[in-house]
Image (cartoon, rainbow, N blue to C red):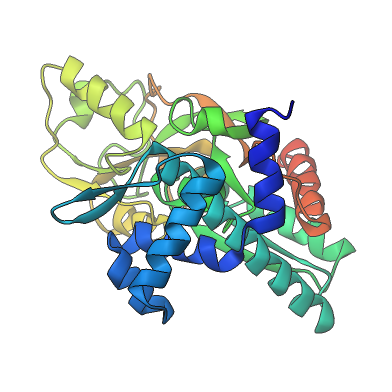
Amino acid sequence: MIDRHSRIVDRALTRLKLRQLRLLVAVGAHGSIQNAARSLGISQPAATKMIQDLELDFEVKLFERTNRGVVPTVFGETLIRHGKLIFAQISNAAQELDDLSEGNAGRVVVGTLLAASTSLLPKAIELVLAERPNVAIKISEGTNEVLMPGLLSGEIDMVVGRLPSHRHRNKLRQEKLFEDHILAVVGPDHPLAGKTGISFPQAKPFGWILPPLETTLRRQIDHFFVAQQQYVPAVSIESVSYLSNRALLQSRDLIGLMPAEVVSHDVQNGHLAQLDWQVPFGHGPIGVSLRGNDDLSPAGRAFKAALHIAAQTRHV
């Protein structure tokens, strides 16, 4: 007797059409079968029949009707997510074929968090291009909240930076590259620059450049501030743009909290100064996050290998 899983897989392989998945994703986006059908240029009765056929084939209810339209059930959300991943993979395959036809040796899309953007990634890119000079590399910068959905949907091949400790972790494969820590940095002309044995009360009068609210580091900072007699900075600037942060630190008496990997070069060459204050939070692994069950393209595997080499030789 064929079990339910095998039966559904057999139906999907023999009957499932990409236009059904396109409609499914469109209904999820529009919240309306009518609007989704209109966007795809098909009639509403035909769209309704296609959804009903999907529900019969997968033996689940995909959408619930409400007075505002339709909303996906948990089964619908799951199938929509996999549908998006299928279309992303098709797009990636088409892009890779296009790159190969134009003489490029494959393509890789890398998401980067601030902690990896200034030294680790450039070194990895140099290593890849030395072996594959025609590879097409796309870098997308942002926070985990922006990059992880793109990774899970297949639009991004890997995300490099501080490894998430809770959210998204069960859906990812993580490879640690090295441990990093947070430094408090200021401009070279800041009143605290060059002073020794700085205590937190000495830093209180100044403004701070902080990471966004949704980041793990920001939550750690906020907890620390609360523990310091409910401290609230006089000026607080949220930014993940390192170029902007560096310019602000050099022009104003602000304090920035940033990964050591990011600011080490500017501290060494005197563009920024490290405060003599040991930051009591923010230690964590820098690494690469990948989809848990996905195989990288040859270009992607080459880039991941280059990241490991760059991490091992970053201070050499």
Expressed as whole percent of the image width and height from the top left, the position of residue 132 reads 86, 66
Pick the front one: 95 or 106: 95
Expressed as whole percent of the image width and height from the top left, the position of residue 40 reads 43, 77
Q: Residue at x 31, y 52 (%)?
A: 239
**Which image quadrant for residue 196?**
top left
Relative to residue 60, is residue 98 drawn left or right?
Answer: right
* Residue 217, above or below 134: above
Q: Which residue is drawn at 24% across and 21% down?
A: 223
Pick the front one: 109 or 30: 30
Quarter that holds the C terminus:
top right
Q: Can residue 267 be seen in this view?
A: no
Quarter that holds the N terminus:
top right
Q: Which residue is drawn at 11% across and 31% down?
A: 232
Expressed as whole percent of the image width and height from the top left, the position of residue 283 reads 48, 24
Expressed as whole percent of the image width and height from the top left, the position of residue 65 reads 24, 50
* Residue 9, above or below 37: above
Pick the front one: 161 or 279: 161
